[in-house]
Amino acid sequence: MPVSQTRHADCSVIIPVFNRSNILPKCIRSVMAAAGDHVTVEIIVVDDKSDDDERLTNQRTCQSFNCHFVPMMVNVGCGEARNAGLSLANGKYVKFTDSDDELLPMSLYEEITYLESSPADLLVSGYIRQHSNNSKTTYPPKKYTNNNPIDALLNAFGAPISSVLYRKSILNGVKWQSRIKHPDDWLFLIEVLKKEPILHLRNRPVFIWIDHNQPRVSSSTSAVQYARNRYEILLEIWLFAEERGGINARQVQWICDYHYKDIYVAYRQDRELYNTILSRIKSLDRNYKPSRKAAGGLGSYLLTRVIGIQHFVVMREIIIEGIKKIRK
């Protein structure tokens, strides 16, 4: 596979890394195998201020594979590291991958071949998850329709980072947001979808998501922080919808259901967020009642409709605390 450091690469593959010098070579080899002999890639490794020894090893690894090595002077997080790599990318196509992911052989060649013969701006493929017991599960991409991007956003259309191949042109003006660490991939895809691209899905898997003992961003994000992040993302979607002329009653129900899913953890751990979510729901639909799915069961669904969500949340938490005390 030709690895390029020129301005004529078919594809730029951007890999942020923090330490992990032991697994970076395997990731780079997988990128090379994914490209095969007919695709030229530039591999851009952005070292997010690794420890000194790890940083030096990562630099030597990049030299041995003829990759770009971009050292960050301070630790900025995955999002800003990806932005740094994107600012240097010269390929016609762009793929982001993480150092603990492995692209499948010839997958990048197949993705590029697909986009070369289609009008799509980005291609979302499936992936394989390798569990800690070495068993594997294959996941197809989530459903998407180009006819209604707002519906797609509110249905949590997203994809693992390594599942997506972008035409570089569709990423003009799009950046990873460092203020949200998880789900940062959903937020980035939202920013792309706001440009109303042509998006195609492909069921073939293109990488292996490996469960391991080293932490991922998601595992280090608490439930309440995830709730805060999702609140911010839903506001982003709402603003986009407003720019397009507003949203319908069905979409309002979806937004409120999303907010309602986070209301319990907010009540327990962040009362300010809890009050913000309640106010947001009331501003969207003063008569909102959660769907059966959002309520979490028939009993909860019926009770929330009778006594209202605010009273139900309080009652539910009192009951849960009472059960805990009895069990002690």
Image (spheres, helix red, strand yellow):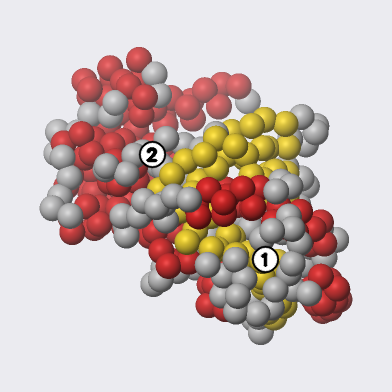
Residue 243 image position (x, y, % from top left): 18, 59
- Depth check, front residue: 43 or 174: 43
- Depth check, front residue: 235 or 114: 114
Q: Left or right: 281 with respect to 273?
A: left
- Residue shown at the point (80%, 32%) measured from the top left: 133
Q: Say above or below: 94 vs 155.
A: below
Q: Earlier in the sequence, mark 2 or mark 1?
A: 1
**Crowding at mark 2 (Cα within 10 Å: few <14, some 14-19, many 20+):** some
Could you say which disc has been placed on residue 40 in the image? 1
Residue 265 image position (x, y, % from top left): 45, 41
Q: Left or right: 19 with respect to 91?
A: right
- Depth check, front residue: 73 or 12: 12
Q: Report which quarter residue 128 is drawn in.
A: top right
- Residue shown at the point (39%, 72%) measured from the top left: 173
* Residue position marked by numbered label 2 in the rendering: 144
Q: Is residue 86 visible?
A: yes
Quote the CA–CA distance across marks 2 and 1.
30 Å
Could you say which disc has been placed on residue 70 in the image? none
Q: Left or right: 73 with respect to 199?
A: right
Q: Report which quarter residue 250 is drawn in.
A: top left
The amino acid type found where label 1 is placed reads Thr
The amino acid type found where label 2 is placed reads Tyr
Task: Locate the C terminus by quadrant.
Answer: top right
| Residue at disc 1, secondary structure | loop
- Residue shown at the point (28%, 17%) measured from the top left: 302
